[in-house]
Image (cartoon, grey):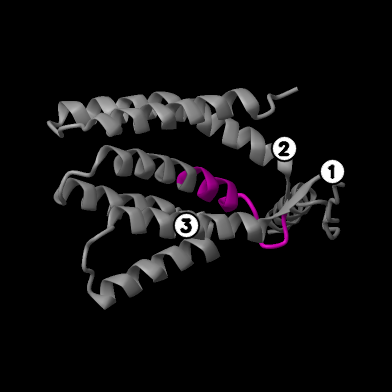
Amino acid sequence: MAGLAARRARDAGEARAAQGGGRTMSEVSVDLVRPVPAWALRGVVGVLGAATLLVAFAGARLHPVLVAGFVALVVAAVVIPGLGLTALVVLVVAARVATGEPLALGMLMLLVLLVHLMLWAGALAARTSWRTQVELGVVVQGLRDVAIVQVGVQVLAVVATVLGGVALGGGDLWRALALVAAIGASVLLLPRRS
């Protein structure tokens, strides 16, 4: 019996040591050069989520209950980004694209860009609390990484549109080239890691 009590006391002591020795953990404060508040990142998630849904459902007459559900989904993605609700927004958009009329090339390319930015911003916001501040350099580097991926993704969107049988107008190809060129320019202009 005494051996069991001693073992429990030892295990409890090891657990306290693993948690900081039973002392209250202190907060860490890091001085940031150009801080971005987490609430701003979460606001960006909301704007991108709303814009993504607006582009996906452009021209559609939606029932007010469905609109309220979309608003609730975007608000929940902002308030609790750790749940990954931005992925649910993407699922809704994918269902719309798969079941609706084929999108014009410009709309599809914009939708691909919005989805990628929303998922990236949601993942960044999920790693923050409301009081967190993120160094602007982290945000800029993440945007640069998104832009690098988007160059190839936008080309694939054009190829998928053509293979899907959607007829492209002369203006569509110029818009596609302009968007890919703009993304490529952002890759070159955004600062690199030091």
Inter-mark Cα distance, 2 to 1: 9 Å
Left or right: residue 44 versus residue 158 is right
Q: Where is residue 38 in the image (x, y as percent from the top left)?
A: 67, 56
Give the number of the mark in front: 3 or 1.
1
33 part of magenta stretch: no
Q: Where is residue 116 in the image (x, y as percent from the top left)?
A: 44, 41
Q: In which quarter of the image is residue 185?
A: top right
The secondary structure type at the circle numbered 3 is helix
Q: Position of residue 123 (x, y in %)?
A: 53, 46
Give amino acid for label 2: Gly
Question: Disc 1 marks which residue?
Answer: 33
Q: Earlier in the sequence, mark 3 or mark 1?
A: 1
Magenta stretch in the rendered image: 119-132
Q: Which of marks 2 and 1 is nearer the N terminus?
A: 1
Inter-mark Cα distance, 3 to 2: 25 Å
Question: Disc 3 marks which residue?
Answer: 83
Left or right: residue 75 versus residue 33 is left
